[in-house]
Image (spheres, rainbow, N blue to C red):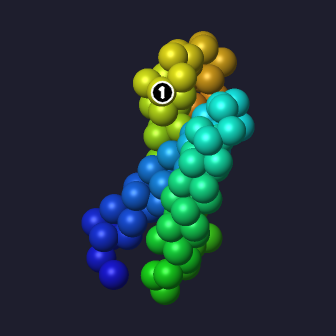
Amino acid sequence: MNTATALAILFVAALLEAGGDALVRVGLHGSALKRLSFLLLGAVVLFFYGYAVNSPSWDFGRLIGVYIVFFFLVAQAINWLAFGQKPTAGILLGGSLIVLGGLVISLLRN
């Protein structure tokens, strides 16, 4: 698998995980029908996250830094766009450390 394909799969997995979590969050705070619908949809999306991230034969430990960066960025975007919560200074500072850590993990090869 080439690097671009691996990055694309990791990005899609981050979208699925953060999106599935957001669906479950909405489902927990809705009416009975809305709750059931969003919880089931969240479960399906989270299943596909698990499939996407585990189906390729790769050293996931080596790629986890990039995945965490993607997950953090996607989760913050969803939090801002779907729930109206802008990142705080602490989140931006901590997030910059997450991105820096992902770069270190990705660029330093042993």
Instruction: Choose top left, top right, bottom left or bottom right for residue 95.
Output: top right
**In which quadrant is the N terminus drawn?**
bottom left
Residue drawn 52% across and 74% down? 51
Residue closest to the eye, 11 or 78: 78
Query: What's the residue type where badge 1 is placed?
Result: Ala
Residue drawn 28% across and 66% down? 4
Q: Is residue 101 visible?
A: no
Residue drawn 60% across and 13% down? 89
Residue 88 point in image, percent of width and height: 60, 14
Residue 41 point in image, percent of width and height: 54, 54
Residue drawn 60% across and 56% down? 40
Judging from the image, what secondary structure is the residue with disc 1 in? helix
- Label 1, on which residue? 82
Residue 110 point in image, percent of width and height: 56, 72
Say above or below: 55 vs 74.
below
Residue 64 point in image, percent of width and height: 57, 61
Residue closest to the eye, 83 or 77: 83
Q: Residue furthest front?
A: 33
Instruction: Choose top left, top right, bottom left or bottom right for residue 2.
Output: bottom left
Q: Is residue 83 visible?
A: yes
CA neighbours of label 1 inside 10 A, class few (<14), some (14 to 19), many (20+)? few
Residue closest to the eye, 17 or 8: 17
Q: How many marks?
A: 1
Say above or below: 109 vs 18.
below
